[in-house]
Image (cartoon, rainbow, N blue to C red):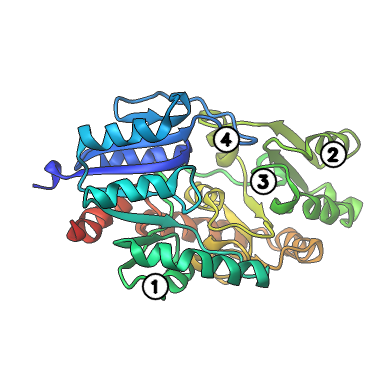
Amino acid sequence: MISQKKILFIINTVTPYQLDFFNKLSKNVNLRVIFHSKDHVNYKFNFRKKNNHFFLSSQVNQVEYFCKFINNFKPNLVIFGGYRLPHNSKFISYIKKKKIKFFYWLEKLNENNFLKYHLIKRLIGNKINSSNGVLAVGKKAKKIYSKYNKNTFNFPYSIKIKNLNKKKYFKNNKINFLFVGQLIQRKGIKEILSAINKLSCSEKEKILIHIVGDGGLKKLIEKYQQRNVAIKYYGFVFGNKLSKIYQSSDVLLFPSKFDGWGVVPMEAMANSMSVVVSKNAGVSEILNSKNNGFLIEPKSSALLNAIKKFIKNKKIIIRHGKNNRNLIFESICNADNLSNYFLKQIMKNI
């Protein structure tokens, strides 16, 4: 029986989208999740701790705690959400001693930094080869890691698909663009501000840029908001408040200079939004510019061009939104579907 199988995930920090997947999976397997920490830089999530959630940060001797946990739970499979998690080497050494199978769950590497990319591949190659398999976050990641371990699966992040009322576009007769994420340079927030500055006065009157998040560039955003009526800044928001912002927005801006995947575009797509996504984000592999939005280089000029296209033709936003909702619902980016995929494909290994 699948329900008798014991699965342990070891993850860095708590994120809502992973909790959605774990909640689905726990209905079919005996699941435990160990988080290294409750805290995440620039994120302040409130969540309800469940009986199958455990935290290493509260333990004095984390290695000893882990070993006792393994002895008591006796998992059939351990999945590490990263290759650089604290104490990874000691944890893996112990479960190998116990002859317990283990997988890695890994995002793609940043190929733009050539030297670092090849150095990391060399460093992690042996680690991946010694594992029983890899859950690769996307097809591009699978292509990288399958060279070191043939037992590699396409296993992207996923989200819970919520029921929606009929989508109402263009609130206040404007195109509502949205950015959600950390306010740091890597996420391309400066490129968004630069693109806005280059719009004409008449173009600015037709749009509103909603910005959600926290980080080092917060003061810069606040300064822009004070002198630019086209910007509305919310600070850090999550849960139902964020859902309402998604529902009243039309187009997501995601010009990240690099992202191993990118959950925010999936959330926007599930809310029937069009998207402008950086080609350097892993999630871009499930999109195309004809049906879903625009795939761009993470530059202000590319952002500006995309924004202008939407201003000239608002109807494509509605078409993209419908396509995107269906795409996420039917794919393994839907937590229900990913859980079923895990049961059918990954469980074969144990």
Find disc 2 in the rendering and name its residue: 220
* Label 4: element kind: loop
- Which sits earlier in the primary sequence, circle 3 or circle 1? 1
Q: Residue at x 55, y 31 (%)?
A: 39
- Against 277, is 39 above or below? above
Q: Residue at x 83, y 46 (%)?
A: 205
Comparing labels 2 and 4, the label whose residue is closer to the camera: 4
Q: Which mark is residue 146?
A: 1
- Against 30, is 331 above or below? below
- Which sits earlier in the primary sequence, circle 3 or circle 2? 3
- Which sits earlier in the primary sequence, circle 2 or circle 4? 4
Mark 2 is on which residue type? Leu
Mark 3 is on which residue type? Leu
- Nearer to me, 113 or 290: 113
Report the Cα–Cα distance between label 1 and label 4. Answer: 30 Å
Q: Position of 16 compared to 69: left or right?
A: right
Q: Position of 124 compared to 298: left or right?
A: left
- Which sits earlier in the primary sequence, circle 2 or circle 1? 1
Q: Is residue 279 visible?
A: no
Report the Cα–Cα distance between label 2 and label 1. Answer: 42 Å
- Nearer to me, 239 or 8: 8
- Against 57, is 130 above or below? below
* Label 3: element kind: strand
Quadrant assignment for the C terminus: bottom left
Find disc 3 in the rendering and name its residue: 178
Mark 4 is on which residue type? His
Comparing labels 2 and 1, the label whose residue is closer to the camera: 1
Q: Position of 151 compared to 254: left or right?
A: left
